[in-house]
Amino acid sequence: MGETQASEYRGDIHRQQRDLMLRWYQRLEESAHGGPPAVSLMISGNCVELLEAFGAVPLYPEVNALQLAIRHQSLDPILAAEELGYAADNCAYVKADIGALVKGITPTGTELPVPKLVLCNFVGCNTYVKWFEHAAEFQNAPLAMLDVPFLRTAEPRAEDVAYIVCQLKEIVKQLEELTGRRFDYDRFREAVRCSARVEEAWSRIKHLARRTPTPFDAYFDAITLMGPLYVYRGSPEGVEFFELALRELQEKAERGEGIYDQERFRVVMEGPPPYPFFRTFRDMFAAWKATAVASTYSTVGGLWEFGFRHDPDHPFESLAMHMLAHNVTNRNYLQRYDQIRRYVEEWDADAVVIHFVKSCRLFSAGQGDMRGYFTQQLGVPTLYVESDLEDPRYFSEAQIRNRMDAFFEALEHARSTGTLHRGVAAIRHAPGGEIAPAASDRLKILQ
Amino acid sequence: MRIAAGVDVGSTQTKAVIVGEDGGIRMLGYALVDTGANVQRAAENGFLAACRESGVEPEGVGYVVGTGYGRYKITFGNTQMTEISCHARGAHYLFPSTRTVIDMGGQDSKAISVGEHGEVLDFVMNDKCAAGTGRFLANAAEVLGIGLEEIGPLSLRARHPVKITTVCTVFVESDILSYLAQGKKPEDVLGGVHLAIARRTVSLARRVPIEPGITMTGGVSRNTGMVRALEEVLGAKMQVSQQAHFAGALGAGLFAIEKMGESFESGIWRASNATPRG
């Protein structure tokens, strides 16, 4: 293990994303003082385009929670929520958000508005139902539930799509009443068109990471870009930002620049990061010149690198498709297995790293089996570490560092003996020498 | 003869091994000291004691690999490696047929899948919880007022081991007290404690998964009751060396010999580097 190299890429896009996020908080403060209406949404499979049609600002409790964590401010609100009676193993995002609401804490110190509507676009995570109910209660704001059926089959059923479209249209009526603004269908279609362009740029950015060396880290750097992705996806600012990001990273790729002087290990990341120790965690990878070439967490808001785009010719239906099938949290576990496997194969990875989040059942339940699937059935080296995405008390630095170092020591040894394989070869060298069938083949039984 | 050392600074105890290479590789001597609060001092004391034990001058040691939680505090060490790699390597040296290592230490228990050359193929460890580790046993011994060395042999006398339902190192105390209040014999309570830990450890180990050629390492390997309980739950015999406690330090010493070949630096130990005694 050599000297740790800084792994963070700092280009124009990093400055711009910070400005965009601060601008978002300013807009939210304006909203608190009679400016544009705000609507709370959950990130996963969100319908931000609908809000654009009303000139409304999205308010994402998750973004606030993670911003608190990354600024080392999450413990106070978590403790405040625990004093209210939230249990130790409740989702720490929920506790940070509710605690912050109760204590009046905001990540940037700017004021946050009371949303005109707390819109729970329930996608995959049932904890969010309770979270948004509580958020509505504590803010004395109206609540609406968008009931998105879990993706039970490989493709969504037509009746599921119709069910969601019908609900979205009800939400439109509700928003017209609550905001006093007319739904602007042209503006809605324009927002969907912007989203499709952002998704195209974002997808191309993701595909740049298939190169060796990868020009950016598709976990840590991707997370930096995810704020604007959620807040600005359906807006011209979003299009401008992501097309600039694509150009900047494309140029970096064409110059053959990687993250380190020499990229040693390419990993696929599964699970959200430990936000309270984001830098510490990143440096553990940097110590081994290991870089993430793909990550499932960066597909929580939407899974676009495999081709799905919002469609301005079918705006409501494409919103429904996005919510049902094209974000990682509403997809079933076997589809997640296949997503990771595709990353290993097509993004040329050596290994998988799973970060288990103690307080998140949605993302973490089943990751022990997932580890078993990759190590034992596919023969891909897979590391499993545990902490939390929001609660700093769950991060044990010595333990995590120990596992990381041991894992990369083993990979280094395997490379020196010619037994570490990359990409498709990693799967082809699965125990037994046979190519394992895709996990989701088992899904056919369900159809 | 080329001489190198491995120093394993564990949470409870520090182990040091001196290894010599002269045609073949031999363990020249080893030493064990309590880690205590001063990790740096413990590493030095362990290293110096192992040198004395081996009849080797500290200055004659060409390369030192540190391992264990305190590895970054070993100021006189050349490099550090995790104890996972080191236990695999050490266990493989002690028993070349090793394919699975079960290591139980003061605060860690881990299972390592080992390749035919002693390399780590996969590993799993306990997380955030001392259940299934030496600390669990130490707490049980303390509640019963029995010495740590005695609990293993005593547990072997259990005829009706109690069922310990908690796996929490702290709450096990109240479980034990309630069994004692019911008039259960200490050996039956201890039998239950050992089985509880063995079940937890084996369920952890099954995730690697367990291949024949199981070697136990770590301080708890000296507990005969624990070895028996693990074998019972595993349904297989384990290989346990007299030096199993030193497997991590031994592995570090073996890596040190290897690394010496890459960059030899004699006289790594300098008295001036030592922590001031006070």
Image (cartoon, coloured by chain):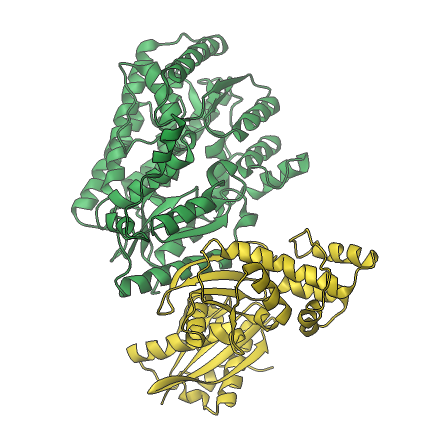
Residue A75 percent across, percent down from the top left? 57, 43
**Quadrant where the image shows the C terminus of chain A:** top left
Q: Which residue sits at x=21%, y=37%?
A: A247
The tint of chain A in the picture is green
Instruction: Classify residue A3 by image quadrant.
Output: bottom left
| A105 lies left or right of A317 | right
**Quadrant where the image shows the N terminus of chain A:** bottom left
Q: Which residue sits at x=47%, y=86%?
A: B271
Q: Which residue sits at x=60%, y=81%?
A: B278
Q: Nearer the viewer, residue A12 or B113?
A: B113
| B215 lies left or right of A382 | right
Q: Which of A159 and A263 is in front in this view?
A: A159
> Is residue A26 depicted above or below A409 in this figure?
above
Residue A95 percent across, percent down from the top left? 58, 36
The tint of chain B in the picture is yellow
Residue A159 percent across, percent down from the top left? 39, 14
Is any atom of residue A243 visible in this view? yes
> Is residue A51 depicted above or below B214 in this figure?
above
Q: Nearer the viewer, residue A307 or A36?
A: A307
Instruction: Classify residue B185 by image quadrant.
Output: bottom right
From this viewpoint, which residue is outermost toward the left?
A: A254
Q: How many labels does the image show?
A: 0
